[in-house]
Amino acid sequence: MTQREQISIVVEKPDFSKATFIDFEVEREDWNEYRLKDGTFLRAKLVFSGFLMDKNIDELAKEVKLGKKLNVGLGFKSTPVFGVELPHGLRGTPDPTQYSKAQLQALITEEVDFETTKAVWNSYLLKNGIRIKVRLSPVSISRTSKFDDAGIPVYWVEYGVDVKIMLPERIEKILAKEKQMEKSKLQ
């Protein structure tokens, strides 16, 4: 039995008036890798600095016992980090200017097709026993007309964040017990 067979977990924006930060341990934080059609090699990952939830583990366990769909108000603080390696011919005139996101978006010259060469789920174990797996997933990658202070093209990456929640064993045991009770009622 897995928790996915037993209960529907819905991740939603937390109620920030009730949310508290949950301490966590990094279990895995690795790079995703992409080969761009222009010959550039792009690495990407999210670095997390905090997770917050608006329910404690006892409240979640109670919802499970009541058979409710499990709504998890989850928020996190993260920063996307990108690194590029490129063929020498793509370098341009270095520009130390720091551009805003809006300015960079206006400077896009072309969308660059890409192939995913490595996609990993990074894993974080929250102090309350919940394991969260996340993955940065690029939707589009574009090159701007600007170059950084090393002459490397500045890329614009639009991405989504995929999230999986794995409940702690304590809640898994509640789910198993409920399933067993349901089975005995049907016999």
Image: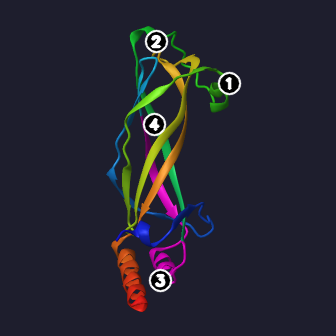
Q: In which quarter of the image is residue 130?
A: bottom left
Amino acid at dot 2: Leu
What residue did someone put label 1 on? 106
- The label nearer to you, 3 versus 1, is 3
How far separated are the C-alphas under marks 1 and 2?
20 Å
What residue did someone put label 2 on? 90
Specify whether residue 1 is painted magenta.
no
How far separated are the C-alphas under marks 3 and 4?
40 Å
Q: Mark 1 and mark 3 in contact (Cβ < 8 Å)?
A: no
How many residues crowd mark 3 within 10 Å: few (<14), some (14–19), many (20+)?
some
Q: In which quarter of the image is residue 32?
A: top left
Residue 147, above or below 83: above
Question: Which of disc 1 and disc 3 is earlier in sequence?
Answer: 3
How many residues crowd mark 2 within 10 Å: few (<14), some (14–19), many (20+)?
few
Question: Which of disc 4 and disc 1 is earlier in sequence?
Answer: 4
Element marked by disc 2: helix
- The label nearer to you, 3 versus 4, is 3
Q: Mark 3 and mark 2 in contact (Cβ < 8 Å)?
A: no
How far separated are the C-alphas under marks 3 and 1?
52 Å
Q: Residue at x 40, y 76 (%)?
A: 171
How many residues crowd mark 1 within 10 Å: few (<14), some (14–19), many (20+)?
few
- The span shown in magenta is 44-69
What residue did someone put label 3 on? 65
Residues 17 and 105: in front is 105
